Amino acid sequence: MRKLRVLVAMHDVLVPPENAAELPPEETWTYQMEFEVVKTLRELGHEVRVLGVGDELRPVRDAVAEWKPHVVFNILTDFHDVVTYEAHFVSYLELLKQPYTGCNPRGIVLAGDKALSKQILAWHRIPCPAFAVFPLRTKRAKLPRRMQFPVIVKSAVQHGSAGISQASVVHDDQELAERVGFLHRTLQTDVVAEQFLQGRELTVSILGNERLEVFPIWELWFDKLPEGNEAIATSRVKWDVRYQKRIGLQTGRARNLGKDLEEQIVHICKRTYRALHLSGYARIDLRLDQEGRPYVIEANVNNDLSPGEDFPDSARHAGLDYGQLLQRILNVGINYKPAWMVE
Ligand SMILES: Nc1ncnc2c1ncn2[C@@H]1O[C@H](COP(=O)(O)OP(=O)(O)O)[C@@H](O)[C@H]1O
Ligand SMILES: [Mg+2]
């Protein structure tokens, strides 16, 4: 294997301290991914430098110009604290003619907008839930006639279930208007309302540019969800470890889907990846409806690589340990051909 100069770009507040390896997990969890990625890239034998990115582009430019990394391992997910600027940071790397890992800027923009991405998927006839968009300045939110309650209300651009709780599933226009108003006020983004899908929750991890590698279909479920609660990944489900234990949160390989449905899901996910012009790696989230039919709910680019997350877990089921996965991500990044490279 070729030894590479790898510059790991991460949020400056998430740069792990020197003694991170000796600290207990409750102190390191915020930068666990950053820590594991750097450590593992070093164990793979690469020459690794960390670039903490704050509000300045100059350090990025200097690091690229002075050290000439073969590749930037990009785990930065916002700039100026704006999530949608994730794409612009990658654009900047392309303008510097710097190879990088993960998704290209166009894919990040398309996948990062839950309204725009579904407009594209619908054009391709890729199954996704019916939806309505309520832009930030909208005063009155009312469900279009073509849709039926219940619907789930969410930010068009936030990730990590920000603003998603049990109250996100609404049953009439009054609840809808309240929830839309609440998200407009608290998150300051456009909002989408989607047909609420009652069935199983699945996610599919994909790696590649043109040729795609699809890892086993993964499922999220609850063993002890309280009566009356919807089985959805609220922000509490994603981030509150004690609550996860209480409701018996489980993730693992999806069982008993049947061969036909599995093939259909893989096909849908590959088409989604291509329709949204994704590259590098991504995770496509899906739900089944009451009849067991699959629908795409969103595509996550540059998704979480922390050990124990769905992406590395499902890669491991496909036979790739964490180091092999990061090496594949590096290779796919180096092989990506942005516009400046094409003759
Ligand atoms: N249309 C839907 N039907 C049912 N549940 C949904 C739907 N959309 C989202 N959810 C639930 O909300 C969670 C978060 O929504 P998602 O669109 O994946 O946003 P995020 O970017 O925050 O992960 C999903 O994992 C799922 O549990
Ligand atoms: Mg999601």
Image (spheres, grey):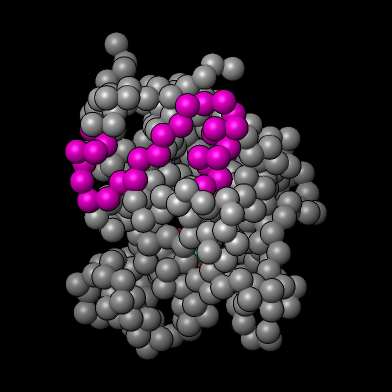
Residue in the image at 57% along x and 58% along y: 23
Magenta region includes residue 251: no
The residue under the point 40% across, 39% down is 50
Q: Residue at x 24, y 55 (%)?
A: 80
Stretch in magenta: 35-61
Q: Position of residue 312 (x, y in %)?
A: 62, 45
The number of numbered badges drawn on the structure is 0
Quick one: quadrant of the C terminus? top left
| Looking at the image, residue 173 lies above or below residue 215 | below
Residue drawn 48% across the image and 82% down it? 167
Using residue 136 as the reference point, say whether residue 78 is left or right of it.
right
In the foreground, 83 or 108: 83
Considering only vertical position in the picture, is 130 above or below 266?
below
In screen coordinates, is 283 left or right of 290?
left
**Visible in this render: residue 263?**
no
Q: Nearer the viewer, residue 128 or 219?
A: 219
Between 301 and 55, the residue placed more toward the observer is 55
Direction from residue 275 to residue 133 in the image, left or right:
left
